[in-house]
Amino acid sequence: MIPREPFGRTGHESTRVIFGGWTLSEGTPAEADRTLDLLDRYSINHIDVAPMYGKAEELVGPWLSHDRGRFFIATKTRSRTREAAWEDLKRSLDRLRTDAIDLWQLHGLTNPKGAAAALGPGGAIEALVEAREQGLVRYLGVTGHTPEAAAMHRKTLDAFEFDAVMLSYNYAFAQKPRYAERFAELARTCEERGVALQTIKAVARRPWAGRSKTYHTYFYEPLVAQNAIDTAVHWVLGHPRAFLVAVGDLQILPKVLKAASRFEVRPSDDAMRALVEKYDVRPIFGS
């Protein structure tokens, strides 16, 4: 069984592994059905999707239309203006076949100029607040992939009381002193303010670097061996506040869920160094 923890101050008891909708961005209805069976097997109760994730919202929609209370559902907007963000929400609600979203997130908010636009007058934040006031969304969040995300999220939390953040986190990232320091500062801020801390890229092995993209992982070549995935997943779950958004590949997803279901303790530094050496694990972004 995958453990559950309070998702920040939202009141939702979330499985510590969240299903990442990128997995279904190029999926079929049959693959969606098999994925739902897999999520049921591990009692996953939290889904994260986005309009830019191909077919994901459309394929998740039937799940919600049959039993809306089954999942805490999160989606995103990449738009930076009020009007464009509203259009994104309307499309998401239609595709997801639901009247309300649990968590609506500003996607990829790591650029200062974009953040200023989104959080300023006429910015997307106005749509988020209005949608919350109208009961179309319950909670608000912000996401980012790049090394700038940790520092930017801290600034963003000072500008607005978001309920959740999302950013990259794995052992390789944590070995970069500047990133580790900024992540730790963000994690402390999240704990102090009751903000949910969502992490991505747990099973990243290294940048694709010209290699054939055999797996459906956009930014990185993933770890594939079950023992390696176990070690990487257990290291992330060893952070007491971190939720892990699962890998976006249907072949690897079962291995990630299996790993999470048998988590007990965080692997030792020796075990992590051995993983890095054996599988040539490297940060997938620069500093």
Image (spheres, rainbow, N blue to C red):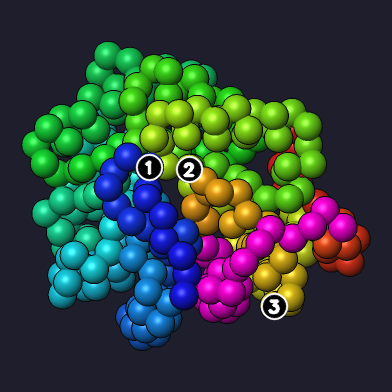
- x, y percentage for residue 187? 55, 35
Work out whether residue 187 or residue 129 is closer to the camera in this orientation and state it.
Answer: 187
Q: Using the rendered image of the protein, determine whether residue 233 is visible from the camera's viewpoint.
A: yes
- x, y percentage for residue 193? 40, 29
Report the residue that reaches farthest toward the front.
264
At x 29%, y 52%, the residue is 12
Quarter of the image holding residue 231? bottom right
Which is more N-terminal, label 2 or label 1? 1
Q: How many marks?
A: 3
**What separation in Å lies between label 1 and label 3 (alpha carbons)?**
30 Å
Would residue 47 be counted in the magenta stretch?
Answer: no
Q: Is residue 276 left or right of residue 53?
A: right
Q: Amino acid at mark 3?
A: Gln
Which is more N-terminal, label 2 or label 3? 2
At x 38%, y 42%, the residue is 8
Q: Amino acid at mark 1?
A: Gly
At x 40%, y 36%, the residue is 195
Return the residue at label 1.
Answer: 8
Q: Secondary structure at mark 1?
A: loop
For the residues labelled 1 and 2, say whether their Cβ atoms are less than 8 Å apart: yes
Q: Is residue 115 above or below residue 100?
A: above
Q: Using the rendered image of the protein, determine whether residue 280 is visible from the camera's viewpoint.
A: no
Residue 226 - label: 3
Q: Are there few (<14), some (14-19), or many (20+) residues within 10 Å of tag 3?
A: some
Q: Are there few (<14), some (14-19), or many (20+) residues within 10 Å of tag 2?
A: many
Which range is magenta? 246-270
Q: Amino acid at mark 2?
A: Leu
Q: Is residue 27 left or right of residue 65?
A: right
Q: Is residue 254 above or below residue 196?
A: below
At x 27%, y 47%, the residue is 11
Return the residue at label 2.
Answer: 197
Would residue 248 be counted in the magenta stretch?
Answer: yes
